[in-house]
Image (spheres, rainbow, N blue to C red):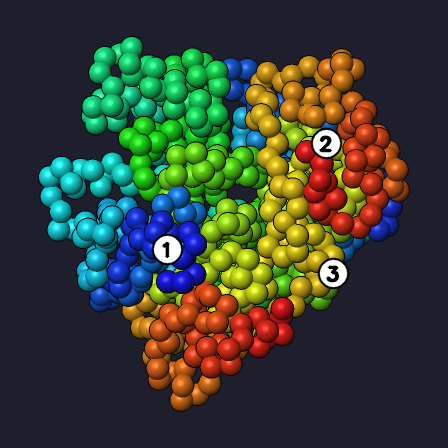
Amino acid sequence: MTASGDITVAGKPLIELVSVTREFKTPGGAIKAVDRVSLALGQSEAMCLVGESGCGKTTTGRLLAGLLRPTSGQLLFEGKDVWTTKGDELARFRRSVQLVHQDPYASLNPIRTVYQTLSAPLFRHGKARGRRAAIGAATELLQRVGLTPPADFLVKYPHQLSGGQRQRVSIARALSVDPRVIVADEAVSMVDVSIRISLLNLLLALRDEFRVTIVLITHDLAVARYFALRGRIGVMYLGRVVELGTSELVVGDPAHPYSAALVAAIPEADPTLTRSKERVELRSAEVPSLLRLPSGCTFHPRCPLFEEGLCDVQVPELLPIPDGRQVACHVAARERAPAAELLGVR
Amino acid sequence: MPTKRASAAPQQLEADQVLSVRGLSIAYSTRRGPVQAVRDVSFDLRRGETLAIIGESGSGKTTLAVSLIRLSPRTAKITKGHILYRKEDETIDVASLGDSDLREFRWSECAMVFQAALNSFNPVISIWEQFLDTARAHGMMDAKHVRSRAGELLGLVNLDPERVLRAFPHELSGGMKQRVLIALSLLLKPSIIILDEPTTALDILTQRAIIDLLRRLREQLGFSMIFISHDLSLAAELADRVLTMYAGTVVERASVKDLFYRPRHPYSMGLLRAVPRVSGALGNVVSIAGSPPDLINLPGGCTYSPRCPFVIDECKLREPDLLAVDTPNHDARCIRWKHVAELVGKEEAVVAEKLGAAT
């Protein structure tokens, strides 16, 4: 846990997944959407979970938010096992951890005005009594998320707002209950490119101002790099975290061959750079089914660093390497070098 | 319906031009009144060239693309302009083609790969039947010939024909479906392929595979390509030329390098500054303030003026023309382009990096 030492408060995580596995039953059999994932987040930390579809990042987000019960393992909030708490304590956890969804067109009730959307949780959690107090609190929330003048927005319905404005309302709603943790699942992917950065900046400002911990789940490594500039990135593949470390290391010099392949594959908004990027050739383009996971390291059938008798036999654990990050790769750990270097794409 | 326009005497296209859109305007009729979705758009496409149309939601890029093969919904009308296409030695105006000519034009001259790859298939028939249906609709009746052409095309897009032709759409991954659609679009050897957001909703590694595939196919088969995307990096990867669209009109036309390194329209500049990169310096990444205008109620003068940091009173008087700027074959719909040029300069580096220190 040294990597997070400077970020967690007094070494004590605020919220933590401890070796959490979550299975789902499917017609083809049980699948492990998340497999023994451990993540610890400190107060006002910004972390990104990245990975391709089906890697378990959304399930991990829902496990963190307490919306899914782990099949095994624990969710700890302030050191207490959330799934054994009840009553007031559970209610406090529910308030403390808020989720912002991907689709601002679906997550706001179309027949409620912004005021109604924001005041409902205020009343429910006793944050406001009476209409005047609720208007005051909602006005303040809208100011916080940059929807000004607030009076113009209070009376609007979702269809009268742009995608970015709706997402700001969703964030304001999450803030209404003074959360300690916000899990934002692809919160900027459906928003126009020109305003994505301002939404990320809003989330980062909330982190600085209110010391909220923010977990951003995204498939976009450039967004992850920007958001987690002073935080960490976790890369997920087939239900496991394969690399976890500072944004600078994970994106700048990836240690896991899968992270290296992702970074090398990303097109960039720079014609000369993007056309001359070194590629990482994978041994197979096919993503294995969660129903029939490969033996050993699940990335081994595609991995350019694959070693027979090692990678297809032993499951690599997520272990610290000298530069302070954690990586689940036998070869990178043994060579004490990031995959980007071993593959010559540094 | 649009026969009147045919009399407007379209000019002949030069031998290496395959498509020329001239002064095209398209309006949707809605209950709130007509929406000017596309206004006075002009561009040329050369043989073998790849053109990227970039812009955000509501910029009119999809309306424009769909209208090129006249597949717009009934509520959309071409109100002005020509879509000139050079077929062998003659020039035809797609905007005035009758139904049967139009059917022939689609697929055999110009094919389109739609955005929602997942929804472009009939879910209850196999991939083989999709190929056969498309072929038959265009007069290729010999199943054996279709079979061999389908096999050849699926091989070209790196799919195993035996397996894929027997499969149903739901049995294929997103990336495989996109490959099948690309193969299908090539069935009648069109000279232009239009792709709407070809990599959106695909995973990173799949995206990369599709980009590399398109690049290879273009080299092997020599078709021209128009793709529409909100993803600037896709344009940086594949395009020879780029059009930036805003509020239904083209605000900048440039070579890919000019657009990315020497943008002259404040909106192109703003878009480029708003996109963080994965490699290299992050630079000063900033969003564009405000939001795109209501197309029914367009602001007077330059439609970008309410969001533009370079705005002066004159900008609000009338919408500027596309003006030639300081690099050849490059124009911008902005009377203040010299100020953008002063800020951005000419060096070959991305805008966010050059403007690192500026605010």
Mark 3 closeness class: few <14, some 14–19, many ≥20 residues within 10 Å = some
Residue A133 visible, this orientation: yes
Q: Quadrant of the N terminus of chain B?
A: top right
Q: Are marks 1 and 2 on the same chain?
A: no
**Residue B266: mark:** 2
Does residue B280 appear left or right of residue A224 in this picture?
right
As drawn, B69 above or below A247: above
Q: In the image, what residue type sits under mark 2?
A: Pro
Cα distance in 3D space between marks 1 and 2: 37 Å
Label 2: which secondary element? helix
Q: In the image, what residue type sits under mark 1?
A: Lys
Viewer-side residue, B310 vs A4: A4
Circle 3 marks a residue in which chain? B
Q: Position of residue B301 (x, y in %)?
A: 72, 17
Q: Earlier in the sequence, mark 2 or mark 3?
A: 3
Label 1: which secondary element? helix
Q: Residue at x 38, y 14 (%)?
A: A155
**Residue B222: mark:** 3
Please identify the residue farthest to the front as the structure is shown. Answer: A10
Mark 2 closeness class: few <14, some 14–19, many ≥20 residues within 10 Å = many
As drawn, B141 above or below B147: above
